[in-house]
Amino acid sequence: MSEKNLTHLEKIKEAVHQSKDISTEDKALAVKKIEEWYIEDKGMKLLGEQLINISKEIVPILEEMGLL
């Protein structure tokens, strides 16, 4: 995950924690979703790295798909 994206997710997570208008249950759900986004982003990065290791010819395909 890029540093910029990580910073944004951390800011959102902190804002959720500090909100007085969101119930404890909704805060937990929001934080869970943010953490899922982080894991998904990390997984996509890993997938791209592994595919590049498999074949350098796949780079144009990944770029076309917006994964790189």
Image (spheres, grey):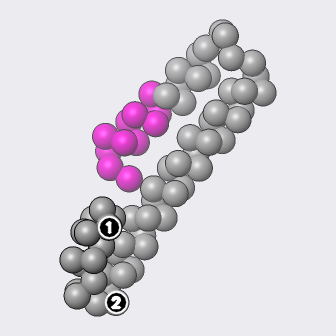
29 left or right of 64? right
Please give the label number shown on residue 31: none
10 Å crowding of disc 1: few (<14), some (14-19), many (20+)? few
Amino acid type, callout 2: Ile
On the image, numbered disc 2 is attached to which residue? 54
Amino acid type, callout 1: Met
Q: Earlier in the sequence, mark 1 or mark 2?
A: 2
Dot 1: what SS? loop
Residue that appears at 45% across and 56% down: 41
Cα separation, mark 1 vs mark 2, equals: 17 Å
As drawn, the residue found furthest toward the right would be: 25
Residue that appears at 53% across and 20% down: 15
Find the magenta span and give its range: 1-11
Image coordinates of residue 45 in percent, x first then y, are 39, 65
Comparing 64 with 35, the one in front is: 64
On the image, numbered disc 1 is attached to which residue? 65
